[in-house]
Amino acid sequence: MPLACSARGPRTGPICGHSMLTVYNCIVNEHDLRLVVLAAIICALASFTAITLLHHVRKSAGLVRYTWLAVSATATGFGIWATHFIAMLAFSPSIPTGYNFSLTLLSLVAAIVLTGVGLAVSLSKLPGAAWLGGAIVGGGIAVMHYTGMAAFEIGGWIVWNPVLVAASIALGALLGAPALKVGLHGDSIKYRIFGALLLTAAICSHHFTAMGAVSIVPDSSISVSESALPPTWLAIAVALASFAIIVLALAGLALDVRDRRRAELEADRMRGLANAAVEGLVVCDGDRVTTVNNSLAALAGCKVDDRVGAKLETYFPDEATRLKLLGRPNQPIEAGLQHSDGITGILGPNQMMARLGGDEFAIILPDVAHASSAGRIAEKILEVLRKENEISATAALVSASIGISVSPDAAAPVSVRPRFVA
């Protein structure tokens, strides 16, 4: 009689006088590898769907949050369940087999419920929540698998390898724990892919290690119960489950595209508002620059995208200024800005320019005793403005007149007027 490798439950019996075959040999010789590949594909699809939907859970609140949590748990639970039973259907034994309906249904419920608990924990504020939630999902994989194995009926006695049983449970938990941590690390698609791959590895490694823990001893005196589901019926149920996973995957993808498009439109709108401001604006994540507006880029002599990701000290070398910026978020601060060539321009460290109102500015030059010294600085300023006009010939030209007053003499201002070429 050909031997098949699976389990009917935690039942064991005498094996003397009987030949015994391990599942390892069954995987090589009596598995339909096409179904094994299909199981892996369904598993990966369900894992990616779960991670994607979990991001929507994290962004939601109230009843909507619980709704998306239930959808994510259902997708993951169905994926774990479908992976297991598609792989079970990949067996090609030549003796009757069947599946206990109650235990098969219980394995599906266990997968969904325990997965839901794990996903909920991963989003909580508990210490190491993502790691703990992933480990619970790994435990759910084990509960579903061994409940599903108990549902499988075949004529024979089973023998369990306790070392491989323990190893299968450990693999599910160890690979499941970092899966949610990685998947929820950021909104970037790469984190979702890596998280889904880890979850897929947790499910598949557990399944095949657990199958390796089973050996069967055929016994013609043991028959499949009449109430057991035939493999054909189970195949229909698995097909429906797989279809549900695909629908949920498409729904998750549609939501992801919609949210990304909305985020892009919102970012464009905020960028437009920021660029409309005359003041220089900088958005930071800690001491790293996330983005700057056009005004700040012009003041710093660089392009908007050139300094994204740079440290604050690139723009503001003064430590006191940086402490003010970090200590008073969303508040305007007067600060010295370093130019892209590394030179706050013409003025020295003790010299300051301030806006008086409208298009009037004042420059304070300490320790300048003669109008001629101030005049040289004025000529440098006019030369810079003249060059700017030449560079920006298509834009509005800047004209300026500079008056100089030396304290404490308070003499009549000396007027220095530039000559500009339009």
Image (cartoon, rainbow, N blue to C red):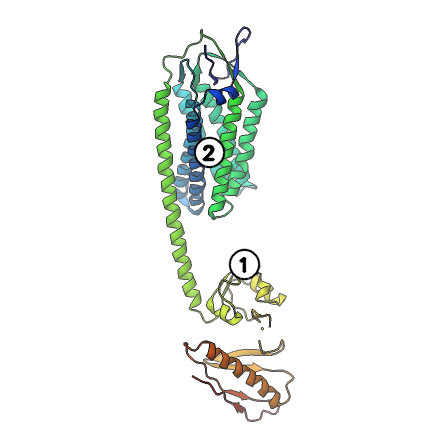
| Front position in the image: 382 or 130 | 382
Amino acid type, label 2:
Thr
Residue at figure coordinates x 39%, y 37% from the top left:
71
Residue 103 position (above or below residue 358): above
Would residue 380 be seen by someone viewing this image from the given angle? yes
| Front position in the image: 130 or 189 | 189
Q: Which residue is mark 2?
A: 115
Quadrant where the N terminus sits is top left
Residue 261 position (above or below residue 202): below
Quadrant where the C terminus sits is bottom left
Q: Which residue is mark 1?
A: 309
Amino acid type, label 1:
Gly
Question: Looking at the picture, how far across and down is residue 159, in whole percent?
Answer: 53, 15
| Front position in the image: 148 or 164 | 164
As drawn, the residue found furthest toward the bottom would be 412
Frontmost of labels 1 and 2 is 1
Question: Looking at the picture, how far across and down is residue 297, in whole percent?
Answer: 50, 68
Residue 393, quarter of the rendered image: bottom left
In 3D space, how far apart are the residues under numbered discs 1 and 2 (Cα atoms)? 37 Å
Under circle 2, the secondary element is helix
Residue 350, quarter of the rendered image: bottom right
Question: Looking at the picture, how far across and down is residue 404, in whole percent?
Answer: 56, 88
Looking at the image, tell me whether mark 1 or mark 2 is earlier in sequence order. 2
Question: Looking at the picture, how far across and down is residue 293, in whole percent?
Answer: 47, 66
Under circle 1, the secondary element is loop
Residue at figure coordinates x 53%, y 80% from the top left:
384
